[in-house]
Amino acid sequence: MSFHLSYRAEPGNPWFSWQYVRDNSDTILAALREHASLTARAVLIAAVVALPLAVAAYWFRSLSGPILAVTGVLYTIPSLALFAFLAPYLGIGAITVLSVVVLYALLVIVRNALAGLGQVPPEIREAAEGMGYGRWGRLFRVELPLALPGILTGVRLATVSTVALVTVGVVVGRGGLGQLIFAGFQNNFYRAQIMTGTVLCVLLALVLDLLLAGVGRLLTPWLRSR
Amino acid sequence: MNPIEQAVVWLNDPLNWTNPGGVLDRLGEHLSISVAAVLLGCLVAWPLGLWLGHTGRGGGMVVLVSNVTLAIPTLALLTILPLTFLGFGRPAVVVALAVFAVPPLLANAYTGVRQVDPEARDAARGMGLSGGQVLRRVELPLAVPYLAAGFRTATVQVIATAALASFVDGGGLGQIIRAGFGLDIAAGGGQIIAGGVLVAGLAILAELLLAVVERQVTPGPLRPARRRANRRAADATAGG
């Protein structure tokens, strides 16, 4: 994504300027769109990969130790280092950013989904078994619905942290709103641009979080009466 | 030569370590920034967390703080703070990193005091201890495993985010990675990976070292609680 930013001289370098927003609305929207699409794709991919992993760890207890250990170590690795490991192979571009944020989102979702599945009371599992549910039927009709709050917590956490993490993508030139923040810093420390990028970032995280909270409420009607 | 071989060559060149702006200089910067940020975070978060836990109020605030900081990009704080009264240079970077150290420290201090057995608290009261004495002699010692778990999470996170200080030329090991990206990816690939290895190695080393410290400061009878404290710490934070 290339940026065409126009800087009209303004006295005093204000923290916010409508004039800046008006002059650069196309660029700002493009950055926002890229940021949102990177986040959405990353969380979607991460959730699709993470759920089977969590179920595998839940079914085969011997797998849960290694899976938790690997995700724990990966989580310790700083994001910039992960960019450094992947960029020489994946190149400078969106694929690198996507891979890094997917990895982090994956860890968060796996851990929370596993915690959610672990909280299914053994009595309920046994009752389902006694009613004749097989392994898969029990998983889809009983265990996954009961683990849904944990899974959704993981997806929400992953979404919010992904929005923040995408900005680090500036290191490979695809940081969405991060590009705006970074360019603002480099162009004579243009406060209005840095602030616009930051506020949009936080707002995007907030809106996506509320959206997912709403989806969660719709999906778990039995929790509402409490 | 593939990037990994280049990285090995880069790391084996002694000049890359000892030159001005080499690995040793950057390591020193990285450590001093991180230590200052963690100390500043502890100074703010621990008294507040312990006090909130003692009074039993503000649980909502603790959650709010960690949720809000989760949504703020590190890059944003690193670029905004130098433009405020803090000015360019070390203080702005340290404050930016300290902000991200606060949530795990605060959350763990709070839960550490809250999880103290109410009977122990009542017994202390019954023995005539005042509120402050209960906090200092009963709740604080029992919260130590949680404080240590929070300290570990916060330190590892600060060391990780300190790598991003390089975006605003704040120094640290991230500078090596950024310099590599500044070259062409074919020419700088080795240096980029070498920098990544150094940053990741430092974070993992800190994690392992502090895990030992955490075990040492946890009194024997409280050790089973360690696992739970770790999970709390992991839940309290997320994001790079």
Image (cartoon, coloured by chain):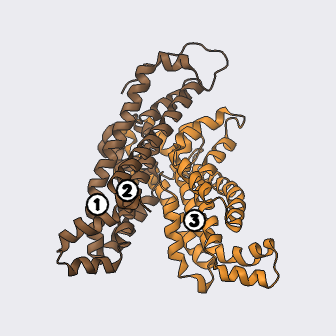
Chain colours: A brown, B orange
Q: Residues within 10 Å of mark 1 (few under 14, many from 20)?
A: some
Residue pointed to by mark 1: A51
In the rendered structure, which amino acid carries the disc numbered 2?
Leu
Residue named by callout 3 = B152
Q: Residue at coordinates 62% horizontally, 54% vertically from top-left?
A: B61
Q: Position of residue B97 (x, y in %)?
A: 60, 49
Q: Secondary structure at mark 2?
A: helix
Q: Amino acid at mark 3?
A: Arg
Q: Pick the quarter of the image with the N terminus of chain A.
A: top left
**What amino acid is labelled 1 in the image?**
Leu
Query: Is circle 2 on the same chain as circle 1?
Result: yes
| Position of residue B16 measured from the top left corner of the image (x, y, whole percent) | 51, 48
Give the CA separation, mark 1 to mark 3: 29 Å
The foreground one among B219 and A124 is A124
Kindly indicate whether the residues beneath marks 1 and 3 are on one polypeptide chain: no
Mark 2 or mark 1: which is in front?
2
- In the drawing, what numbered circle is on residue A152? 2
Residue A215, placed above or below residue A70:
above
Left/right of residue B191 with respect to residue B113 in the rendered view: left
* Mark in front: 1 vs 3: 1
Does dot 1 land on a helix, a strand or a loop? helix
Label 2, residues with CA under 10 Å away: few <14, some 14-19, many ≥20:
many
Q: Chain of mark 1?
A: A
Q: Secondary structure at mark 3?
A: helix
CA gap, disc 2 and disc 1:
11 Å
Q: Residue furthest front?
A: A225
